Amino acid sequence: MSEVGHCFARYADDCNVYVRSRKAGERVMALLRRCYAKLRLKVNETKSAVASVTGRKFQGYSFGFAKEGVKCKVADKPMATFRQRIRQLTRRSGGRSMAEVIERLKPYLLGWKAYFGLAQTPKVWRTLDEWLRHRLRAIQLKHWRRGSTIHRELINLGAAEQVAKRVAGNSRSGWRNSDGDIKRVLTIAYFDKLGVSRLS
């Protein structure tokens, strides 16, 4: 492809070729079929197509247009898989300590961040970071259980008396409570100290 001036990306046997028009794309596809035939190989017709870049996926990435040009992002399917896996690793009924939960999270978060590090979606990363820490706060509240314990632990972490009282008073509303005043104490910086990797 480089010999005829086409841009392309290849990973193992998965390849995308980028051209300026559909007609050019059809010519390239015909060329690839001929080249593969000489090697006694076939183009996988069910996975291959001549299409707009915004309609295709490549190794978990998808593409879209912005003012700056084409940008890449994580495709919908791996994004859904990420959320599902995080839910599994942060189940509030798991009975594990916060340290154990974080240790289980670390390799997955680091691997995912390394693989999708080319995605140009800072707002998405910030949203996922906050969603993950929301789940971790819910786990912490679950571990503390009683309102008196929540109050004591938050005061020990430097919470204002009124904040500690409000959070302790809502101890039965774990998920909603973990996205309220407690965010002033169990901040992203707090989880940084515990070793939770940021995506953003």
Image: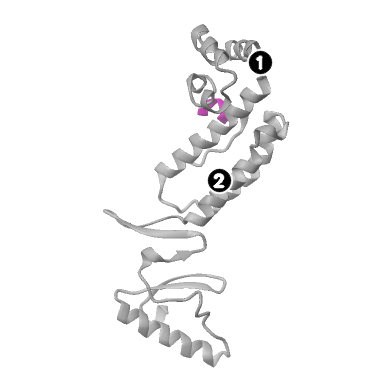
Q: Residue at x 65, y 25 (%)?
A: 142
Eyeballing the image, is 158 above or below 114? above
| Residue wearing tag 2 | 83
Going by the numbered disc 1, the residue's amino acid type is Arg
Q: Residue at x 60, y 43 (%)?
A: 86
Pinpoint residue 72: horizontal percent, then vertical percent: 41, 57
2 or 1: mark nearer the eye: 1
Eyeballing the image, is 34 above or below 83? below
Going by the numbered disc 2, the residue's amino acid type is Arg
Residue that extends furthest to the left in the rendered view of this protein: 67
Q: Secondary structure at mark 2?
A: helix
Asked whether, in this view, residue 152 is left or right of residue 17, the answer is: right
Q: Along the line of sight, which residue is nearer the eye, 39 or 126?
A: 126
Q: Along the line of sight, which residue is nearer the eye, 175 or 19?
A: 175
Residue 110 visible, this angle: no
Residue that extends furthest to the front in the rendered view of this protein: 172
| Residue wearing tag 1 | 146
Q: Which residues are magenta?
A: 188-193
Magenta-span inclusion, residue 190? yes
